[in-house]
Image (cartoon, rainbow, N blue to C red):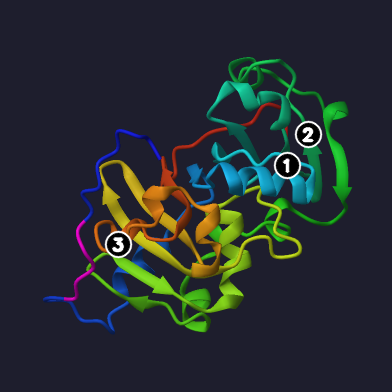
Amino acid sequence: MDPGEIYDEPEDSLDGVDPEDQTPLLNAFASFGANYTAHSKSYFNAVGSYDYYRHYQKNYVMEKVGIFTSSAQYYYPSNEAFAPVMNQGYVNRNGNYYGFHLPGDTVAERLASTLSVDDLSLIEENSSYQQHQFTAWSLGESYFASHAFTRVSANKYVCTLSSSFPDFIDIAAPTLNNEGYYMTFSKVSIEIEPKEDVALRIRLYASSTQRGKLQDRCLDEAGKPNWYLLFSETEITSVGSTDFAPWPNA
């Protein structure tokens, strides 16, 4: 978290709110398009980051931006220093699922680049990236009905069902390798329009046994309850207006 960030989030409250009413949640996803931008942050402390590297022999980039369209998905690091270890995208083309890397050394160069068909590497025929990744587009009425989301405030819903956690790793902690369960979790939350220009904020909380891997500001249950055991979060913006297509006739 930004060291200067001030905790000013209101406590969860159902005052004046029907706890059984899921209409705001369903409405938020009823017309949710495939095009959006996802700003993700995770909150490993130094111990958590180092042990992750020792466990998987790979760095986990904690701040990143994801670009999503109906035909493509690409993440790039918020910190330019991680450009060498984060440059993987996916595209659906002619009914098949491909991977790609954008040319260039910097994020700006990559986002301004153009690929040819020869730059795409086939991953699977008769498939799409949406079949391999859980995205915000995957959420909706049927998912919420089967995963027991509970309303905890006017604009927030929470799920504690463990079967949902792998799905929300893809959304709230993208690129996290959790084979072997390096991290375990306690809940996920979805907030609708938590602040200006943010359509959704989706959070993934660690289980209490993982507190030694989290930043100190995620350990103040009394003073900062909405950050308590917060491991990772994604803010979704530019719904319906995100555009990304660095290849011709994809």
Q: CA distance from mark 3 to mark 2?
A: 40 Å
Q: Which residue type does callout 1 highlight?
A: Tyr
* Residue linked to disc 1: 90
Q: Going 60% across and 67% down the picture, which residue do you hit?
A: 184
Is residue 100 something one can see in this rendering? Answer: yes
Residue carrying label 3: 225
* Whole-number angstrom distance, CA of label 3 to CA of label 1: 37 Å
Which amino acid does the dot numbered 3 rest on?
A: Pro
Quadrant where the N terminus sits is top left
The relative height of residue 191 versus residue 207 in the rendered view (above or below) is: above
Label 1: few (<14), some (14–19) or many (≥20) C-alpha neighbours in 10 Å: many
Disc sitting over residue 100 in the figure: 2
For the C terminus, which image quadrant? top right
Assign a secondary structure to mark 2: strand
Residue located at (71% from left, 15% from top) = 104
Q: Quadrant of residue 133?
A: bottom right
Question: In the displayed structure, does residue 190 sit left or right of residue 35?
Answer: left
